Image (cartoon, rainbow, N blue to C red):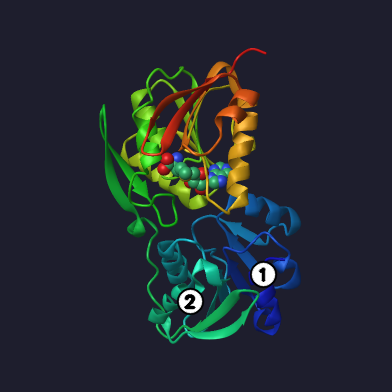
Amino acid sequence: MDPRSEVLLRQAELFQGSVLLAGLPADDLLGKLPNAHGWCWHAGDQAVLDARFEGRCHFGVNVPEQAFETAVLFVPKARDLTDYVLNALASRLAGRELYLVGEKRSGIEAAAKQLSPFGKPRKVDSARHCQLWLVTVENAPQAVTLESMAQRYKVDLEDGPLTVVSLPGVFSHGRLDRGSALLLQHLDKLPSGEVLDFGCGAGVLGAAVKRRYPHNNVTLLDVDAFATASSRLTLAANGLEGEVLTGDGIDAAPMGLSTILSNPPFHVGVHTDYLATENLLRKARQHLKNGGELRLVANAFLRYQPLIEEHLGVCAVKAQGQGFRVYRAKREKK
Ligand SMILES: C[S@@+](CC[C@H](N)C(=O)[O-])C[C@H]1O[C@@H](n2cnc3c(N)ncnc32)[C@H](O)[C@@H]1O
């Protein structure tokens, strides 16, 4: 059981009614709180929750329409995502209780201050290196639209400026990542056919490739529903078409690809992100057709080259700079 769920269960009498658990972990909490429902935006967690508690967890970027008497937000990493979800919950909870739970190391005390616009926050419990906070919603806000919280910026590419639209919580929100910038300078001579942008975030790589190679079909895949919503907005902002999939890892990607393009997930200490990248490198071969190419950018200190050579084929460093490397490997016939 996730320690944040354990803290909620220490106060289980507070959560016996119809409570909405927003951003909940993929553990057994729904099994312990029979009238609770979940709201999830991570496709991997959703798959686990749906398999165990069918129909009890809503997936997506919008608060479920179904009524709820109280809500708990499991504090996400990004402050502006916390703002968006708190606003969505508080707008539906006039006069009722809104809770926030999180680990101390993930900044729960700072996040608790984000409850202040709705009333006077107070700490309910502190255990398992986590805290549980509560506010009675005296000032229920108007619900803001997610799009109103989007940030737009332009990236100058060889074929003109590309507009990127990023939503709260999305990787490198509001600015271009340096690794992605390096990869964008090295998109030449991609094989034609089906392209996958793996871990698409706001969709900058997929959109750039679709514009440069309009005859290619581009699929953009990310595990996070806010990322795929951003990618759709980015494609639309540039008048481009692409298939956008919310799914967990390379297993969710189509087969027969000519190119896999990625700035893959990597976060120190977040095990699942590394696993997603390792799986991508191990399984890229299955998803590429013969002669298909993996082109990815990564921090230079990450030892991806041997793994790519073991599972796919000869891997060249196509470019490097500012601590990043662009790798290029073709699927060879074995
Ligand atoms: C380093 S970011 C790159 C984002 C974007 N391509 C860019 O260049 O700005 C990696 C992305 O991988 C996504 N990701 C993490 N785990 C994933 C998984 N299991 N399956 C698919 N995408 C995942 C993250 O949500 C994040 O958007």
Please give the name of the residue rendered at 56% of the width and 18% of the height, measured from the top-left corner. 314
Give x and y (percent) for residue 71.
56, 74
Amino acid type at image mark 1: Pro
State the mark number for residue 109. Answer: 2
Residue 114 image-quadrant placement: bottom left
Can residue 321 be spotted in the picture?
yes
Amino acid type at image mark 2: Glu
Give x and y (percent) for residue 219.
49, 32
Circle 2 residues within 10 Å: few <14, some 14–19, many ≥20: some
Mark 1 falls on what kind of element?
A: helix
When the figure is inspected, residue 332 is found, relative to residue 4, above or below; the finding is above
* 218 and 182: which is toward the camera: 182
Please give the name of the residue rendered at 39% of the width and 30% of the height, measured from the top-left corner. 320
Residue 284 image-quadrant placement: top right
Q: Which residue is mark 1?
A: 3
* 251 and 143: which is toward the camera: 251
Q: Of label 2 and label 1, which has the lower sequence position?
A: 1
In the image: residue 185, left or right of residue 293: left
